[in-house]
Structure formats: structure tokens, C-alpha cells
Image (tube, rainbow, N blue to C red):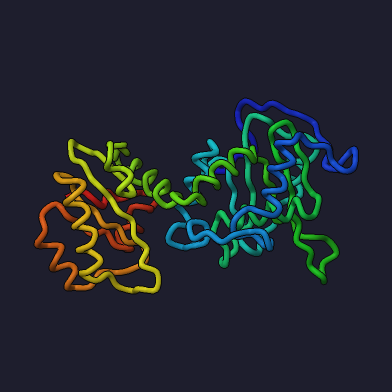
């Protein structure tokens, strides 16, 4: 259940109105605010880039869980999701105005059906900065987001964000890096007991190397964009490389955008120590109660 504050409250007073104007920020915090306003992924900004780990429904829940974990937060206690028609109560709004606790991070935000969870959070942060309804308190960002309705006398209270923005950006940088998908799936496999390993001359040839119960695995992650099904020639290319560079390892071809043809499943059944993990199994790995999809 969501808690407005932690058990070790440390209060600091602040002003939401910027004094002096323009607001004075450290060089580091000035850069952070600009990144959240213009450059965060998948927000309404010309400078923003799109990232599938943040927008794709397959990764939605898990990407958000990864970010929250990296920030040292717990979704059950620290985050409150509102329905599209819900608003924040005046009492809850006032609780975060004027003073905040600098021993915990809290998020209250509306979840829209067209947005992923991460997208909803980043959009709320971007809007609070764009509308000037934010302040910086030590290493914390505190922002509020209202939605203006033309036929309403008062704006709707839709978001309160009290976070350490440096931690958020660090998590986003990992996700949006060239190895973001590997980072996310490595985290997913760790949850079910696998240990990522770095093996000389092998790790660079494959996306992931894992160990569990004295078994070693090499994993190649493939997104066959525009191809609905995986075909035998895709498998054969991977197997040639794996046999040459990782003999004795379990060989896993993980595909997160395609499904597997019957002919490929027949080929898979004939090859010892080889497994194909398709999009349906990836979903099981990314559930809140994850399934060990490599277990026999």
C-alpha cells in the first residue's frame, strides 16, 4: 500500500515559486533539468528519441520495475497510480507543498492507456518543468502537474513527483544505451537465479553469458524487425557461431519480436543443448512472478 512518507521523516521547507528568478541551479542540476525537459526518451519534445524498451507493451511493466529498482524505490510503497479520471485529493496535494521529506522518494501519477508506465512518469516530469511548477530541494526534484480543462473552474491535479532525478537519468541511460536490452534481460534472468558472467573471448561474441547450477549458457538476442516468423536460416547462422566460439555451452537464441515456425521447432528438437526462446516465453520471464524459462 502506498505511503506518503517513510518512517524516518526528515523535513525540509522549500518554495515552489522560484526565488530568485530565473532559478539558480548547480551546473549538474541544471543539466539534469534540461535533460528531463527536452531529451528524456519518448516525451513530447523535438529533441526526444524513441526507445522500444520504454514504449513497447512487452517491456512496459518490467522496464519500469528496473528503473524503480535502480532508483532504490518500491512500487508498492512509493508509487501511487491514478486512473485516467482520478485526481489527487487536496489533502495529498498540500502534504507535499511547502515541505518535503528528504529521506524518501514518492510518485503519484496518472496512468493513461496510451502510455507505458515509464512514459507516463517522464511526461509528468516534463510537463511540471515546462509549466514551471517544480523546485529543487538538495538532491531532490519536486514537481506538480495539473491538467487544464476548459469547462472547469479549477485545473485537475494529476501528478506529484518527488525523486532523486540523478538516479532516474542513470537508469534511463542504461536502458537507452546500445546494450539496453541486454542490461534489462540480464536483470530479468538474475531474478530467477542466473549469474551473469564475463568469459574471455566469449562475452563479446554473444549478448549474454549466464551460469546456474553448474550450467553455462550463451544467449543471443535477436529482433527480426519486419519478420513475423523465425526461419531455419536464422538458426543455422547462430549455431555455426556458437559451435565455433562456445563449445560445451547451452545455446539460447532469444527472439522478442517474432514467433517460431514449425520447421524451426523440428530443427530445434534435433540439436542437443540448443533452445529457442520466443516472444511468449519472454513475457513469462518479465512477469511480476517470473518463470525460469530456461529450466528443463
**Of the pair 267 and 123, the residue shown nearer to us:** 267
Q: Quadrant of residue 161?
A: top right
Q: Is residue 51 above or below residue 182?
A: below
Q: Horizontal placement of 59 versus 207: left or right?
A: right
Q: Nearer the viewer, residue 125 or 217?
A: 217
Residue at 28% over, 50% down: 219
Percent coordinates x, y for residue 131 in the rendering: 80, 54
| 202 sits left or right of 9 in the view | left
Q: Which quadrant of the structure image shows residue 223?
A: bottom left
Which residue is drawn at the image coordinates 33% and 52% (left, top)?
A: 285
Which quadrant does the N terminus fall into?
A: top right
Identify the image quadrant of residue 118.
Answer: bottom right
What percent of the width, then of the height, locates residue 58?
A: 42, 61
Task: Give the x, y percent position of residue 144.
Answer: 74, 49
Q: Which residue lies most toward the right here?
A: 20
Position above or below: 56 against 21: below
Residue 15: image location, x then y, percent? 84, 38
Residue at point 22%, 73% (across, down): 261
Residue 149 appears left or right of 20: left
Count of marks, rendered view: 0
Residue drawn at point x = 46 percent, y = 51 percent: 178
Amino acid at each position: 500500500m502506498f505511503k506518503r512518507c517513510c518512517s524516518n521523516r526528515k523535513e525540509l521547507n522549500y518554495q515552489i515559486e522560484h526565488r530568485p528568478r530565473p532559478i539558480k541551479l548547480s551546473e549538474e542540476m541544471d543539466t539534469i533539468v534540461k535533460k528531463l525537459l527536452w531529451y528524456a526518451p519518448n516525451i513530447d519534445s523535438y529533441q526526444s528519441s524513441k526507445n522500444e524498451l520504454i514504449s513497447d507493451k512487452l517491456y512496459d511493466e518490467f522496464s519500469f520495475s528496473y528503473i524503480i529498482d535502480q532508483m532504490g524505490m518500491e512500487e508498492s510503497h512509493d508509487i501511487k497510480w491514478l486512473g485516467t479520471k482520478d485526481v489527487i485529493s487536496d489533502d495529498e496535494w498540500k502534504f507535499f507543498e511547502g515541505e518535503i521529506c528528504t529521506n524518501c522518494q514518492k510518485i503519484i501519477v496518472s496512468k493513461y492507456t496510451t502510455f507505458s508506465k515509464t512514459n507516463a512518469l517522464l511526461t509528468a516530469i516534463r510537463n511540471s518543468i515546462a509549466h514551471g511548477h517544480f523546485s529543487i530541494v538538495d538532491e531532490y526534484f519536486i514537481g506538480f502537474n495539473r491538467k487544464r480543462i476548459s469547462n472547469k473552474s479549477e485545473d485537475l491535479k494529476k501528478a506529484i513527483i518527488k525523486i532523486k532525478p540523478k538516479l532516474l537519468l542513470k537508469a534511463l541511460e542504461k536502458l537507452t544505451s546500445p546494450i539496453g536490452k541486454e542490461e534489462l534481460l540480464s536483470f530479468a534472468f538474475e531474478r530467477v537465479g542466473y549469474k551473469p558472467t564475463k568469459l574471455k573471448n566469449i562475452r563479446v561474441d554473444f549478448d549474454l553469458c549466464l551460469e546456474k547450477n553448474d550450467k553455462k549458457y550463451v544467449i543471443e538476442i535477436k529482433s527480426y524487425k519486419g519478420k513475423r516468423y523465425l526461419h531455419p536460416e536464422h538458426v543455422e547462422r547462430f549455431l555455426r557461431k556458437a559451435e565455433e566460439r562456445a563449445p560445451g555451452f547451452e545455446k539460447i537464441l532469444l527472439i522478442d519480436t517474432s514467433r517460431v515456425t514449425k520447421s524451426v521447432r523440428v530443427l530445434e528438437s534435433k540439436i542437443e543443448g540448443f533452445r529457442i526462446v520466443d516472444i511468449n516465453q519472454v513475457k513469462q520471464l518479465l512477469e511480476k512472478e517470473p518463470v525460469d524459462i530456461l529450466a528443463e
